[in-house]
Amino acid sequence: MWVRRPGGVKANTANAGTGPGPDPGSLGCRGMKIIDLEPGDARLDAEILPVLRELRPHLTPELFAEVYAEGYAQGLRFTAAYADDGTCAGVAGWRVIVNTSALRKLYVDDLVTAESARSGGVGHALLAHLESRARVLGCHVLNLDSGTKRTAAHRFYLRERMDITGFHFVKRLD
């Protein structure tokens, strides 16, 4: 599929969930390895979920597997950053979305750095990796939502040159 970008330039959107990102070493994170994980990968429960639960404590292994299985069909992907000692240092859940406002964007559902690895460049490396992927996939923006009480995360996003451009409204249905 082709999407018209501003100025009339077209971007090829085939294989939207795939494609390489930058080498983490080029981002100032020597020894860090960034990888994508497919549903069913044993590392999801053993290594990714413990880090993801720092942000989403309600997730059980069963619920996480269900969410990823259904979300994968909707474009959900998980990318993890591994430290040089082989431990999972950070996780990003993301997807490419086509809509009328951004036309094509990479939306970050989850971005979390393990508490033991914070302030070590992991979040920066994951965001830079996703930004590079978004550019390759013809996205116009990379965006995410952040809870109002997560002020340390807000400072991080502002340092990463992200702007606050709107409000996210929620109506509970349960």
Image: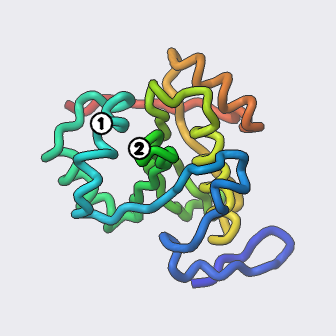
Residue 88 numbered tag:
2
Left or right: where 113 falls relative to 105: left
Task: State which mark lies toward you, 1 or 2.
Answer: 2
- Residue for badge 1: 50
Is residue 134 among the parts visible in the rendering? yes
Q: Residue furthest left?
A: 62
Q: Position of residue 107 (x, y in %)?
A: 54, 51
Left or right: where 158 falls relative to 37: right
In whole angstroms, how far apart are the C-alphas of marks 1 and 2? Answer: 9 Å
Disc with the residue nearer the chain's start (1 vs 2): 1
Q: Residue at x 67, y 51 (%)?
A: 128
What colour scheme was applied to this rendering of the protein? Answer: rainbow
Circles 1, 2 touching at the beta carbon (< 8 Å): yes
Q: Position of residue 154 (x, y in %)?
A: 63, 24
Of the 4 image quadrants, the one containing the C terminus is: top left
Q: Secondary structure at mark 1?
A: helix
Quadrant of res 68: bottom left
Of the 4 image quadrants, the one containing the N terminus is: bottom right
Q: Is residue 22 above or below residue 119?
A: below
Q: Is residue 61 above or below residue 131?
A: above
Residue 70 numbered tag:
none
The kind of residue tagged 1 is: Pro
Q: Residue at x 36, y 64 (%)?
A: 74
Q: Secondary structure at mark 2?
A: strand
Q: Residue furthest right?
A: 7
Q: Residues within 10 Å of mark 1 (few under 14, many from 20)?
A: some
Q: Position of residue 42 (x, y in %)?
A: 23, 58
Q: Position of residue 117 (x, y in %)?
A: 51, 30
Q: Nearer the viewer, residue 3 or 113?
A: 113
